[in-house]
Amino acid sequence: MLSNFTALFRKYHRQLSILTLLPILLITLTGIAIPVADELGIEGMPTFLTKVHSGAIFGSDLVYSVLAGLGLLGLIVTGFTMTGLLPSKRSSSTKLDDQT
């Protein structure tokens, strides 16, 4: 049962990672590039990068940010459940075997 659960989370984790790759990569790269462009004094570049970073360049910054955030949260949840750090629930028949 636990292996089926883990396999299901691996499947969802794989799908989520493919869907969220580009938005999270854009957010990361522009987040790094904004202070660099600002420090170098490149005119207009920090403003453009901020629009890309927030999703405003795509039309709806709220939807972009929420979807990227939910995708990342989903990756965290599915990844954490696959680590095995959560205590597994044992069936009642296993508990009875341990008591004897």
Image (tube, rainbow, N blue to C red):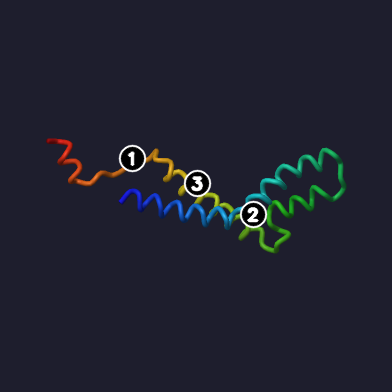
Label 2, secondary structure: give it.
helix
Q: Amino acid at mark 2?
A: Pro
Residue 12 in the image: state x and y as whole percent: 47, 55
How dense is the environment of label 2, judged by Cα within 10 Å: few (below 14), some, or many (20 and up)? some
Name which quarter of the figure residue 34 lies in: top right
Give the mark, 3 or 1, whose residue is nearer the N terminus.
3
* Separation of marks 3 and 1 at Cα, in angstroms: 17 Å
Which residue, as the protein is rendered here, is positioned at the far bottom? 59
Report whether 35 appears left or right of 81. Answer: right
Q: Residue at x 52, y 57 (%)?
A: 15
Which residue, as the protein is rendered here, is positioned at the far left? 100
Q: Residue at x 35, y 53 (%)?
A: 4
* Separation of marks 1 and 2 at Cα, in angstroms: 33 Å
Q: Amino acid at mark 3?
A: Ile
Give the mark, 1 or 2, whose residue is nearer the N terminus.
2
Residue contact between numbered discs 1 and 2, judged by CB atoms under 8 Å: no
Residue 10 in the image: state x and y as whole percent: 45, 51
Report whether 31 appears left or right of 87. Answer: right
How dense is the environment of label 3, judged by Cα within 10 Å: few (below 14), some, or many (20 and up)? few
Between 45 and 80, the one nearer to me in the picture: 80
According to the picture, the residue beneath numbered tag 3 turns out to be: 76
Label 1, secondary structure: give it.
loop
Q: Name the mark on residue 23.
A: 2
According to the picture, the residue beneath numbered tag 1 turns out to be: 87
Between 12 and 76, the one nearer to me in the picture: 12
Label 3, secondary structure: give it.
helix
Screen quadrant of the C terminus: top left
- Above or below 24: residue 85: above
Give the mark, 2 or 3, whose residue is nearer the N terminus.
2
Q: Amino acid at mark 1?
A: Pro
